[in-house]
Amino acid sequence: NNEALTNFQGWQLSGDVPTTKIISGFQKNVDQAAIEVADELGMDIGGNVVKGVHRVPGGADSPHFNQWKNRNIWKELEEAPNLAQAYRARTIANIREADATVAFYSAAEQKTSKGYFLARNEAQRVAKERGVPVEDIFIVIDPTEYQHQISKFQTGLTAKQVNFKEWLTRNNVRTLNVAGPRPEKIGANAYSNRIGEAAKLFLKKTFAKRTAGKTRKTDIKQKGISDVNELK
């Protein structure tokens, strides 16, 4: 039952935070999951994408992908010499365009993902240019953890519980860039969007509120996704 992830009936934008726009690179998994939430709630959406809106071949696009393509909601970057440089340019452009970036990665991926390291290092450069602490514009969340481990960028990344809504408000984050891993390969021809699904539920709970009826278990807990009762 994916009701909690796909059904927004009876939910509306809460207006609890200053964020009005979500951008991403429109890669499969986390990027598209974030755009789904924002679009369903009537927030502005956009982002910089690789020329031709290139995505990895494995895994599935959001069912809304073609609608987004027809609406021309993204900006295609100039063609790069190779795909690796194109992905790098996309990541950098979105971090620079946004007021802040939230990166959804598991604890294991924070140690191995090249995309994560690129985002983290670019955030350091941007923070220095803006004259602000990097932890004010870059935050890392493992949305699959029971306590939703949130890491603040300090000397290295030190796990520390913070209130995500307060972080958005304190730093006046109007445009939020969402980053995360591509689909995880779990078999010869099978892929998982586990992180994307967890990030989608996290973002829905951050930006939306139920307007009618009682909260149902499917809105709080999903198979393979941790309890979100403590989400702020």
Image: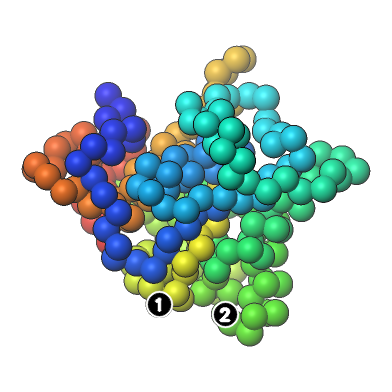
Residue 91 x, y percent position in the rendering: 68, 53
Q: Position of residue 203 (x, y in %)?
A: 38, 50
Is residue 65 visible in the rendered structure shown here? Answer: no
Q: Residues within 10 Å of mark 1 (few under 14, many from 20)?
A: few
Where is residue 225 drawn, in percent x and y?
34, 38
Q: Residue furthest bottom?
A: 131
Residue at 57% in and 50% down: 46
From the viewer's perspective, tell me whether residue 26 is left or right of residue 171: right
Kind of element beneath mark 1: helix
Amino acid type shown at disc 2:
Pro
**Residue shown at 54% from the left, 61% from the top:** 101
Q: Name the residue at the right extreme.
A: 81
Relative depth, front residue between 131 and 140: 131
Query: Is residue 78 shown to the viewer in this render?
Result: yes
Picture residue at 55% right of the left edge, 68% below the top: 99
Percent across and percent down for residue 208 are 28, 52
For this rendering, which residue is in front, 7 or 132? 7
Above or below: residue 63 compared with residue 129: above
| Secondary-structure class at tag 2 | loop
Residue lying at the far left of the rendered structure: 214
Up-down relation of residue 83 to residue 116 (above or below): above
Left or right of 154 on screen, residue 34: left
Q: Is residue 196 left or right of residue 228?
A: right
Kindly identify the residue that appears in the image at 54 percent across and 43 percent down: 31
Sequence-first disc among 1 and 2: 2
Please tell me how crowded label 2 is: few (under 14), some (14-19), or many (20+) other residues with Cα within 10 Å.
some
- Measure how far apart labels 1 and 2 are at the Cα level: 13 Å
| Residue with the mark numbered 2 | 133
As shown in the figure, which amino acid type bears the numbered disc 1? Arg
Task: Name the mark on residue 170.
Answer: 1
